[in-house]
Image (cartoon, helix red, strand yellow):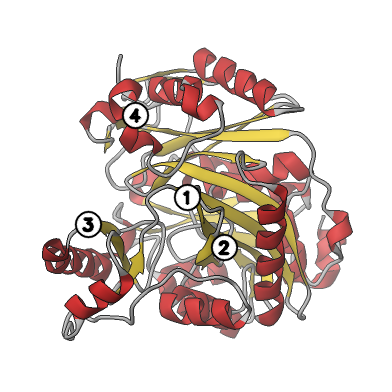
Amino acid sequence: MSGGLGRYGVRKVLVANRGEIACRVIRSCRTLGLAVATVHSEADANARHVALADQSVLIGPAPATQSYLLAERVLAAARETDSDAVHPGYGFLSENAQFARAVEAAGLRWIGPDPKSIDDMGDKECARRLARTAGVPVLPGSERFSPEAVAGLEAAGVDVGYPLLVKAAAGGGGIGMRRVDRAEDLAAAVTATQSMAARAFGDGTIYLERFIDEARHVEVQVFGFGDGRGVHVHERDCSVQRRFQKVVEESPAPGVDAATRAAMFEASVRLVEQENYRGAGTIEFVVDARTRQFFFLEMNTRIQVEHPVTEMNTGLDLVAMQILLAAGAPLPLATQTGVTPHGHTIECRIYAERPAKNFLPSTGTLTRFALPAQDAGLRIDTGVHEGDPVTHFYDPMIAKVIAHADDRPAALATMQAALAASRIEGVETNLAFLQRVLAHPEFVAGRATTRFIERFKAELLTS
């Protein structure tokens, strides 16, 4: 729709990502009538996101550190393809404020929040402070400890209380996070987390945070207009996790009462409005399953992997909204009354992995990749097709299956049928594992907490 967004100066978008999210962003670009350019590594020369684009630029070898994470090469590709805007997807450079500033300095539209918001929320100590200022409950935590300065660590552990989590201050997504139950194990966990954080984020700084043993992980999708206004787009439950990585997400969140839900919504919007936040974001909370108290975990300043759950429940296209806002074009909603959820949605992430071997990735060629046809109640988001290689270079998630129905039992039935109909060969997957998760009495009853997989691992891994 160069005639639609062209008058706003956006005719072509460079998608600075790969795989499933790149294909997802391309879909919204096409809906808006926009031309699309992508980038790719040598390993992705024949990838699906390359085939779907109008043009694609090779930016380096397979390792992300030599291609997708090189901001200057991505920016050069934007110039080479005469793109007007850059959408970073999630992961890679999506929460890199320096890259966002470089995009804007080059005269391009950055399809994401203000770089200051990325900086503020990427610094976990700063994010916690801002949340407190907005009146959002925050878990007890420590100050930051760099690898060179760990004096006072033991005392901080006592103040925070055990069990606790050691978390990277400069990143999220559960990377490097470690649970510590005893004071004598703290130093080793801190050293290991600092090392992984330094590799993943270029910053080994960590902090300690109270760990709630019986918790639900509930997040609120938000959208800010960049002028002090914002809305919530309801919540998602992400409690079913392995190694602090989400596996199943759903909305509405089961087991969360109306008063707690409303309080989380109000707190989330206050934070968005306080920060003049711009675009899509997610505010993550831990909810104590016993007391129903909720606490701020972090804010992700990007589109989430699980955003289709919200889209299926509301009928909104969050990616298109990101693009429209960046272009300065009218949005499909302006106030909270424009958000009208209905029914229940469940998303399952299909990984090429070995659940019985601590969920280690499985590599190989997709000799068969047949997922059920999409319809009004079933959505498939993927970045691969039959014959594609699954390598060790990238995240092993190969598809997301999203089921929507009038209520939770019907959505569960739709999802189970979709997983049962899926045929994937050439690599091992978690398909059977997901089916057992959905069939487990605790999950069916809506009682799953973040310890669900750990607690019922033996049953869930039974073949």
Residue type, label 1: Arg
Q: Nearer the viewer, mark 3 or mark 1?
A: 3
CA separation, marks 2 and 4? 32 Å
Where is mark 1, residue-wise?
18
Which of labels 2 and 4 is toward the front?
4
Q: Which residue is mark 3?
A: 181
- Mark 2 vs 4, N-terminal side: 2
Q: Nearer the viewer, residue 121 or 62?
A: 121
Badges 4 and 1: C-beta atoms under 8 Å apart?
no
- Res. 101 image quadrant: bottom right
- The residue that label 2 is drawn on is 302
What residue sits right under mark 4 in the picture?
Answer: 456
Q: Is residue 7 left or right of residue 174?
A: right
Q: Compare residues 405 and 59 and report the one nearer the observer.
A: 405
Q: Which residue is situated farthest in the front direction here?
A: 291
Chain-order first, disc 3 or disc 1: 1
